[in-house]
Amino acid sequence: MPRRARGKQGKPMDQLAILDRRRLRRKLSFWRVLALLVIIGLGFALYRLGGGEGGSAVQHVAHVKISGMIQDDTELLERLKEIGDSPNAKALVVSISSPGGTTYGGERIFKAIRAVAEKKPVVSDIRTLAASAGYMIATAGDTIVAGESSITGSIGVIFQYPQIEELMDKVGISLEEIKSSPLKAEPSPFHPPSEEAQQMIRSMIMDSYDWFVDLVAERRNLPRDEALRLADGSIFTGRQALEARLVDTLGGETEIRAYLADKGVSQNLPMVEWKDSEDASSLWFASAMAQFFRLTGVADVLGPAALRPFGGEKLFLDGLVSVWQVGHE
């Protein structure tokens, strides 16, 4: 009977071939994984050197969305500062959908946007609603664009607190207090405010209100008496706001682009949304590969068209999260 050829250790040759192939496969898998890790590491390093999560290697129009309740938002303030410092952000569009919020939060965001406006054109884009502190922020733009049915205005200041004295009486709970002066910890939810406490709070409210009215008068180039007339808490549609000179233009992206073109900003620049850095960090790999493609020359050879099936056009907006495409949000 024919015998199988055996190797030095007495194993059949076909088993040795299988073992050799397995060893080779393991070696190839190791080097493939190592090469992939090197490429990722190099891409990440280049990405960080090229601007990181807040930067961009291409010229663009920066786009920031402000929605919900306005408050002191350190991350947003830092993001606005980065946009102001970015040489590739040629303009800023701030889209606002907010019913308002804290006066202090609105003030800080207003000042941060004005700091950007000292370096490049800024457009305030009122979406569904920009009222109270939301409108305060809108006045920071060099121009304000609103929809015909957008809601804005509500210029004023309010201070609210609960009053639970009757509820405490019903459940048989009383509160005793000893304080250094009558106005300490006033107003209190545990008893009606004294006349002195009401005067104190009203004085504070009116001081903030006067500041708000002066801000509107200055930014909208209105006589103070006219700004005061509009600042009775009323809300306005976009059309009414245009007539009252609280906004400059009715429209959307077309009107925004036209204004920026008048300021020397090319209409061909992509409008790119700068998101919260926590959201942006999730796409660091795409940005890293964009840097890698660009600096190794792959981008020049292939071009965005060849990479389009893989999101190539967005890859080359490295560090930035999404493109505000024409006709889309």
Image: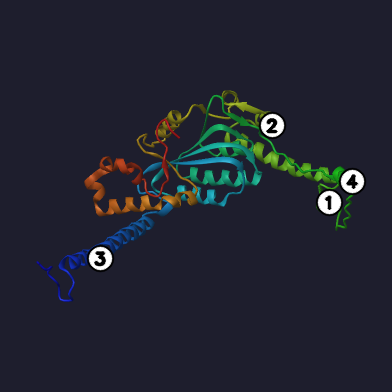
Residue 20 horizontal/vertical position (percent): 20, 67
- The disc, 1 or 4, on the residue closer to the chain's N-terminal end is 4
Residue placed most toward the observer, 69 or 102: 69
Name the spot of residue 79 as percent of width and height, x first. 49, 49
Does label 4 or label 2 sit earlier along the sequence? 4
Q: In this view, does 51 lie above or below 305?
A: below
Residue at numbered disc 2: 233
Residue that appears at 64% across and 36% down: 132
Q: Which of marks 1 and 2 is nearer the N terminus?
A: 1
SS of the residue under disc 2: loop
Q: Mark 4 points at which residue?
A: 169
Task: Please tell me which of labels 3 and 2 falls first in the chain.
Answer: 3
Q: What element carries label 1?
A: loop
Residue type at tag 1: Leu
Gap in angstroms between the C-alphas marked 3 and 4: 80 Å
Q: Position of residue 171 (x, y in %)?
A: 87, 47
Q: In this view, does 269 lie above or below 319?
A: above
Callout 4, which amino acid?
Answer: Asp
**Residue 103 occupies which quadrant of the picture?**
top right
Q: Nearer the viewer, mark 3 or mark 1?
A: 3
Residue that badge 3 annotates: 27
